[in-house]
Amino acid sequence: MSRYRGPRLRVVRRLGELPGLSRKAPRKAYPPGQHGQARKKKTEYAIRLEEKQKLRFNYGVSEKQLVRYVKKARKAGGSTGLVILQLLEMRLDNTVFRLGFAPTIPAARQIVNHGHINVNGRLLDIASYQCRPGDVVAVRDREASKTMVQGNLEFPGLANVPVHLELDKDKLTAKVNGIIEREWIALNVNELLVVEYYSRKA
């Protein structure tokens, strides 16, 4: 399954608030489709699947990419669920979004892909790049890049920059000081159910 490019509010109505996918709030509070208003008890599998889908759609990764992150998290040791979230949060596109340089993660991915971002003084257009402590993320020294990001900073997708990032708004640069902590992850998701989903599939 490739990256989703369909209506975003349809996904938000089905899965709940996804701050990385869309800033808009749906007018209807029930899931989309003909039977959206019908009250149907979800199976345990359906609940685990929904939690997994929240990660996929919020961070804009394909199923194949998410499976790779799960395998990487299992090898890393510690809490697999937390490591999965940290790997997704430390992606360059998500870091650009959390700094307020873009209103959503899809917009941040576009900013990165179009060559508006430097990492450690070098142009980097790979959205999946894993940011590490010590990395310096900066807007490219070009008028078009600066103007676009400055406009986005006035209306950021999320109000607060996480404590692991140190932002200099005037210079449009930021330093990664560490790995994000669980309490700063804005997505409402039960990562343990995601781990369960993949362990039962294996």
Image (spheres, grey):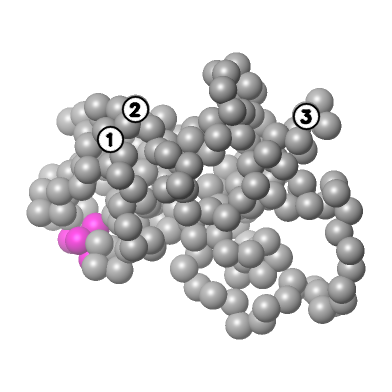
Secondary structure mainly formed by the magenta segment: helix
Q: Are marks 1 and 2 in contact (CB under 8 Å)?
A: yes
Q: Earlier in the sequence, mark 3 or mark 2?
A: 2
Residues rendered magenta in the picture = 147-151
Can residue 158 be seen here? The reply is yes
Q: Is residue 40 above or below residue 198?
A: below
Amino acid tagged 2: Arg
Instruction: Tell me the SS state at disc 2.
Output: loop
> Could you tell me which residue is drawn at 21 percent across and 53 percent down?
145
- The outermost residue toward the left is 170
- The outermost residue toward the bottom is 27
Circle 2 residue: 132
> Could you tell me which residue is drawn at 53 percent across and 38 percent down?
85
26 sits left or right of 90 in the view: right
The numbered disc on residue 176 is 1
Circle 3 residue: 199
Instruction: Tell me the SS state at disc 1.
Output: strand
